[in-house]
């Protein structure tokens, strides 16, 4: 993987899985952009509406990363297995957020010191996907995303970022992910499959 050589004809399944994988990346991008815009205009919304919108965006983010996690093409099978395990941890964290938030997830995450840390597993899934693309196709912004996203959540949880910095950081991450997505989704489909004889 990592070059533009067509090693073998693509099957229907190959094409479908690549489209689903990239659809996950694209939907994650839209979810992040929506969250960033939402955060910038949070002061204009009442608490109930804010929580409802955040829940929608969060659900879309988790769903989209599920697509990418389950349809990613990796030569080394144990990497994909570990990525799936990490995603299951992320889902467990989401269930915890929903239960503890009791219908107000945005307040629970923002008002609880450890709240942002519960988003670390999903950010690590996103970071893995981004870093994988950076490694394979020189999308170097993927390395930046893999580093910035978890550090951003840790910084929020420690209280070192003010509200303006939190919003600006999310806008930066969303913009960087949008750039990454734009460069990724228009690549030829076959490059994500690579040489299937190397899968193990």
Image (tube, rainbow, N blue to C red):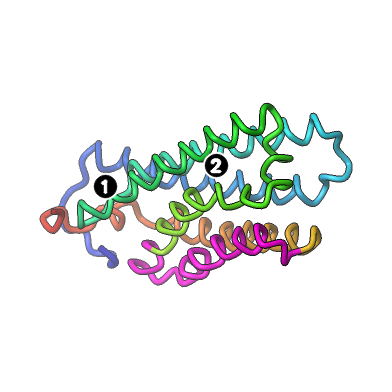
Q: Could you tell me which residue is drawn at 60 percent across and 45 percent down? A: 30
Q: Quadrant of the N terminus?
A: bottom left
* Residue 15 drawn at (x, y percent): 30, 42
Q: CA distance from mark 1 to mark 2?
A: 20 Å
Camera-side residue of 97 and 78: 97
Q: Is residue 146 found inside the magenta-colored segment of the image? A: yes
Q: Could you tell me which residue is drawn at 54 percent across and 46 percent down? A: 28
Q: Is residue 69 found inside the magenta-colored segment of the image? A: no
Q: Which residue is mark 2?
A: 61
Q: Is residue 158 above or below residue 32?
A: below
Q: Residue furthest left?
A: 197
Q: Earlier in the sequence, mark 1 or mark 2?
A: 2
Location of residue 47 (image quadrant): top right
- Magenta-highlighted stretch: main secondary structure? helix
Q: Could you tell me which residue is drawn at 68 percent across and 57 percent down? A: 170
* Residue 10 drawn at (x, y percent): 21, 46
Q: Is residue 41 left or right of residue 93?
A: right
Q: Could you tell me which residue is drawn at 74 percent across and 49 percent down? A: 37
Q: Is residue 48 above or below residue 14?
A: above
Categorize mark 2 by other alpha carbons within 10 Å: few (<14), some (14-19), many (20+): many
Q: Which residue is mark 1?
A: 81
* Residue 180 drawn at (x, y percent): 52, 61
Categorize mark 1 by other alpha carbons within 10 Å: few (<14), some (14-19), many (20+): few
Q: Is residue 39 left or right of residue 105?
A: right
Give the residues in magenta.
132-161
Q: Is residue 139 above or below residue 42?
A: below
* Residue 166 drawn at (x, y percent): 73, 59
Q: Residue furthest right?
A: 44
- Tag 1, which secondary structure? helix
Whether pointer 1 and pointer 2 mark residues with C-beta atoms closer than 8 Å, the reply is no
Badge count: 2
- Tag 2, which secondary structure? helix
């Amino acid at each position: 993987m990592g070059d533009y050589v067509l090693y073998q004809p693509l099957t229907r399944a190959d094409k479908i899985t690549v489209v689903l994988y990239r659809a996950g990346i694209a939907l994650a991008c839209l979810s992040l952009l929506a969250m960033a815009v939402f955060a910038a205009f949070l002061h204009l919304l009442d608490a109930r509406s804010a929580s409802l919108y955040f829940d929608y965006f969060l659900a879309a983010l988790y769903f989209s990363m599920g697509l990418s996690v389950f349809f990613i093409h990796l030569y080394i099978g144990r990497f994909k297995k570990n990525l799936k395990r990490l995603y299951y941890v992320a889902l467990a964290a989401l269930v915890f957020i929903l239960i503890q938030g009791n219908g107000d997830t945005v307040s629970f995450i923002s008002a609880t010191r450890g709240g942002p840390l519960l988003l670390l597993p999903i950010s690590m899934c996103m970071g893995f996907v981004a870093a994988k693309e950076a490694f394979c196709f020189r999308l170097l912004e993927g390395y930046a995303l893999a580093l910035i996203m978890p550090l951003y959540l840790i910084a929020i949880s420690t209280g070192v970022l003010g509200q303006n910095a939190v919003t600006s950081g999310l806008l930066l991450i969303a913009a960087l992910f949008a750039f990454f997505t734009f460069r990724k989704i228009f690549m030829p489909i076959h490059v994500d499959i690579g040489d299937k004889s190397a899968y193990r």
